[in-house]
Image: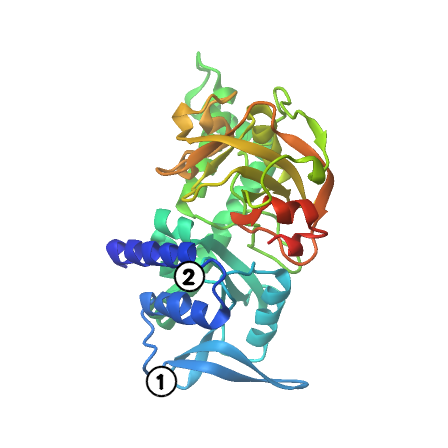
């Protein structure tokens, strides 16, 4: 695909979202989703794209927003949500149920115009269970457009998409194995080297371990956006959309969390803009020891940063006031950037958000998850954060 064309699509969509963040579903479809389908090579004005495609269900029938067809048979279902919404697990399950009704539909795309989740039927598992194979945002697309190769009309029709998905799954399996069995693989590599060349003056075990770790990094760089988390019944290759995941779990060298604070005690104008980021618990050491957050793309000004902790926590749990936004090399971090992130993920344009000293607090009354959570950067106001009963009230 043409990189300039992709860059122009991303730029145009980002401008539209920035100017109309509360865009409704119909405008999202026309201004964001349909240009995306055209970018993939599908002709909206031909018989290969059906709008409001009827799907027979046990209780009657329903409709999916778009069906992409080869001949008379649908092969991809696309479900669109308004840009102002957050993609939820319930909506993923809905798309799975749609795909299940049509034998030839091996692919599904759920999108709100800025976030995308792609499903495929895994015919090697549980009789063709619908699994999440890739998730990405517009910012990811600008950085690594190769993910679109999975979804183009040519790839879908030729079967290339199936091969790419299989390769991604195999790569993830290799990464998981190397991470979970690093000691035994290191020992096997060291024994093989000693057996072939005999004793050496270097530390063979240390060199072998570095080789195994570098191999994991190379495999990660070869596939973007897709998790190597262990498979579960409902999610084989899916991942949560988070902006900071440490390569290996680390402990904070020190905690710069100033203490706890109730949301009503946070000083500031209720209209102040708050950037809400998601993170796994493994991302908290970066937050705590640096009084900062990174490595992220930001294009708008905001006054505060709030952190939604995923996993078992599922709460907006931290708040801090923004002091500056800088490139990673200018941030006074406790460790080298590569100790926190793989090189491939510290790309040009990504920044570190530096907090005002002493402004990072843990919330005494964190905002609990209800049905919406920030799968990527979302914005709210300090007033909404103060009064929200659940995440649905602020996102």
Q: Position of residue 257 (x, y in %)?
A: 65, 26
Q: Residue at x 30, y 57 (%)?
A: 6
- Residue under the image location 35 percent in, 53 percent down: 145
Question: Can you give x and y, in whole percent of width and height, for residue 154 in the image?
Answer: 32, 69
**Measuring 57% from the left and 47% from the top, which residue is drawn there?**
381
For marks 2 and 1, give the CA distance. 26 Å
As drawn, 51 above or below 122: below
Q: Quadrant of residue 159?
A: bottom left
The answer to which quarter of the image holds residue 268 is top right
* Residue furthest out toward the front: 269
Which circle, 2 or 1, is nearer the viewer? 1
Residue assigned mark 2: 163
- Whichever of labels 2 and 1 marks the residue nearer the N terminus, that label is 1
Q: How many marks?
A: 2
Identify which residue, 69 or 141, lies in the foreground: 141
Residue 314 can be seen in this image: no
Asked if residue 47 shows in the view, the reply is yes
Q: Secondary structure at mark 2?
A: helix
Q: Is residue 105 left or right of residue 150?
A: right
Q: Quadrant of the N terminus?
A: bottom left
Nearest the viewer among 345 and 293 is 293
Residue under label 1:
47
Vertical relation: 317 (above or below) 190: below
Residue at the spot 50% in from the left edge and 54% down from the top edge: 169
């Amino acid at each position: 695909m043409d990189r300039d064309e992709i860059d122009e699509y991303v730029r145009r969509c980002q401008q539209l979202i920035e100017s109309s963040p509360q865009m409704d579903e119909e405008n999202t479809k026309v201004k964001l989703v349909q240009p995306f389908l055209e970018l993939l090579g599908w002709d909206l004005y031909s018989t290969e794209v059906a709008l409001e495609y009827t799907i027979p269900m046990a209780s009657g029938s329903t409709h999916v927003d778009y069906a992409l067809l080869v001949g008379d048979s649908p092969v991809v279902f696309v479900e669109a949500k308004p840009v102002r919404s957050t993609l939820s697990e319930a909506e993923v399950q809905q798309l799975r149920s749609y795909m299940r009704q049509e034998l030839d539909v091996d692919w599904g795309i759920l999108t709100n115009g800025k976030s995308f989740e792609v499903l495929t039927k895994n015919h090697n598992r549980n009789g063709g269970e619908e699994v999440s194979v890739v998730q990405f945002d517009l910012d990811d697309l600008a950085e690594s457009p190769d993910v679109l190769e999975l979804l183009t009309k040519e790839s879908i029709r030729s079967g290339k998409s199936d091969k790419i998905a299989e390769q991604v799954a195999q790569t993830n399996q290799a990464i998981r194995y190397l991470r979970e069995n690093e000691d035994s693989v290191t020992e096997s590599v060291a024994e093989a080297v000693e057996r072939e060349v005999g004793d050496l003056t270097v530390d063979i075990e240390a060199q072998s371990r570095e080789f195994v770790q570098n191999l994991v990094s190379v495999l990660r760089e070869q596939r973007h956006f897709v998790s190597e988390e262990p498979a579960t019944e409902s999610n084989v290759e899916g991942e949560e959309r988070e902006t900071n995941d440490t390569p290996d779990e680390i402990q904070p060298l020190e905690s710069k969390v100033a203490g706890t604070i109730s949301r009503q005690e946070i000083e500031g104008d209720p209209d102040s803009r708050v950037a809400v980021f998601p993170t796994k618990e493994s991302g908290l050491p970066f937050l705590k020891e640096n009084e900062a957050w990174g490595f992220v793309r930001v294009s708008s000004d905001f006054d505060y940063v709030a952190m939604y902790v995923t996993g078992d926590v599922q709460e907006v749990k931290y708040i801090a006031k923004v002091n500056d936004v800088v490139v990673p090399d200018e941030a006074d971090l406790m460790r080298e950037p590569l100790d926190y992130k793989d090189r491939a993920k510290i790309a040009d344009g990504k920044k570190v958000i530096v907090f005002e000293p002493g402004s990072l607090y843990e919330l005494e009354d964190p905002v609990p998850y209800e049905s919406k959570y920030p799968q990527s950067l979302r914005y709210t106001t300090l007033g909404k954060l103060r009064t929200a009963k659940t995440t649905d009230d602020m996102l």
